[in-house]
Amino acid sequence: MTVEKVDATLADFGAHFERLFASPDGKVKLLLFLADREPGSSLTWCPDCNVAEPVIYERLEALRGRDAVLLRAYVGDKPTWRDPAHPWRVDPRFALTGVPTLIRWEGGAAAARLGDEEAHLKDKVDALLGAGGN
């Protein structure tokens, strides 16, 4: 199993999204919306993101024998994210209300979603991944 991790910002998200999610290729397709990293740190400004991120990566290992694409989309700094007109808040494909948000993408749409209150729970992440806790 391989997981291709691609990082995107507001500026380059569209190009990455089109390239990775436009056509079916048998891979599990995941979007992970996260807060930006703090300068000089591996942590984000969002405590929930810092808790959920390692859990999500650990559970990706449960996808034995299945390839996956994980597009990590960084929402910006706190003031950018807090703007009610943030592009990913108002885009009906994503309709974000919080970070982190993990979305499984199938057939051109969100097939499953975990918001900021669930993205750190192993059993919920397993269910979204279709891994069944393996």
Image (cartoon, helix red, strand yellow):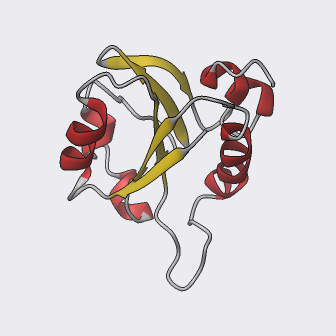
Which quadrant of the view contains residue 130?
A: top right
Image quarter (top left, top right, bottom left or bottom right) of the N terminus: top right
**Rendered view: 42 above or below 59:** below
Q: Nearer the viewer, residue 102 or 47?
A: 102
Quarter where residue 127 is shown: top right
The residue lying toward the viewer, choosing from 104 and 92, is 104
Residue 120: x, y in percent? 72, 40
Q: Residue at x 35, y 30 (%)?
A: 94
Instruction: Answer above or below: position of 107 versus 56.
Output: above
What's the residue at 71%, 41% (across, down)? 61
Q: Image height check: is 73 above or below 69?
A: below
Instruction: Decide if residue 115 is on the left or right side of residue 132.
Output: left
Q: Is residue 85 visible?
A: no
Residue 89 in view in this figure: yes
Residue located at (23% from left, 29% from top): 22
Q: Is residue 20 left or right of residue 133?
A: left
Q: Position of residue 44 (x, y in %)?
A: 57, 66
Residue 131's place in the image compared with 98, above or below, is above
Residue 123, located in which quarter of the rendered image?
Answer: top right
Q: Position of residue 30 (x, y in %)?
A: 47, 34
Q: Is residue 58 left or right of residue 13?
A: right
Residue 87: give x, y in percent of width and height.
Answer: 24, 43
The count of marks equals 0
On-image quarter of the C terminus: top right
Front-lying residue, 126 or 121 = 126
